[in-house]
Amino acid sequence: MYKKEIIGSLEDFLRWLIRNYEYYGETDYNTLTEVTKENLKSFISKTNKKYCYFDFSINGEMQEKVIFELFYDKCPQTCNHFMSLCKGIKTSNSGENVSYENTLIHRIVKDGYIQGGDLDNHRKISIYY
């Protein structure tokens, strides 16, 4: 993050380097990817915020992680429910484990939001105790 500018993909990072530092280096893609990952880990560890991530696959091929910042200061109960579903939680009425794992995504709006499918396959189960 630079002057509150969010840098997303590696390509976004390279464009940012060129725009801000006129960088036209010969560094290979793998090196830049590792540096970017390490910088992100460092940034996250220095904040007092909580994050979680999803690993996505398209047609069985793994994609980049999507990292979510959780706003516990604004909506703690919603964040707790979201984290519970990320980790998997036993339901109150059937005792089944429900999570986002293997949930189908039907819409992704770049720089916006992700909409997922039905976690419980219309069985009307509850995560609330």
Image (cartoon, helix red, strand yellow):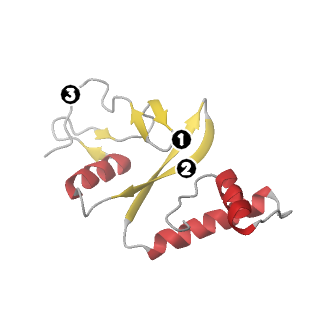
Q: Nearer the viewer, residue 121 or 4?
A: 4
Which x, y percent locates residue 26? 86, 62
Considering only vertical position in the picture, is 1 above or below 77?
Answer: below
Marks 3 and 2 in Cβ contact (< 8 Å): no
Q: What type is the residue that disc 1 sits on?
A: Phe
**To which residue does mark 2 refer?**
65
- Tell me if 109 is positioned left or right of 76 in this view: right
Q: Quadrant of residue 95?
A: top left
Which x, y percent locates residue 84? 30, 51
Which x, y percent locates residue 64? 60, 47
Kind of element beneath mark 3? loop
**To which residue does mark 3 refer?**
124
What's the CA distance linking mark 3 and mark 2? 29 Å
Marks 3 and 1 in Cβ contact (< 8 Å): no
Q: What type is the residue that disc 2 sits on?
A: Lys
What's the CA distance linking mark 3 and mark 1? 25 Å
Q: Which mark is residue 81?
A: none
Which x, y percent locates residue 6? 53, 58
**To which residue does mark 1 refer?**
56
Quarter occupied by the N terminus: bottom right
Kind of element beneath mark 2? strand
Query: Dot 3, crowdedness within 10 Å: few (<14), some or many (≥20)?
Result: few
Residue at the location (82% across, 63% down)?
27
What's the CA distance linking mark 1 and mark 2? 7 Å
User: As drawn, which residue projects farthest toward the left?
Assistant: 129
- Tell me if 11 is positioned left or right of 80 in this view: right
Disc 3 or 2, which lies upstream in sequence? 2
Disc 3 or 1, which lies upstream in sequence? 1
Marks 1 and 2 in Cβ contact (< 8 Å): yes
Q: What type is the residue that disc 3 sits on?
A: Lys
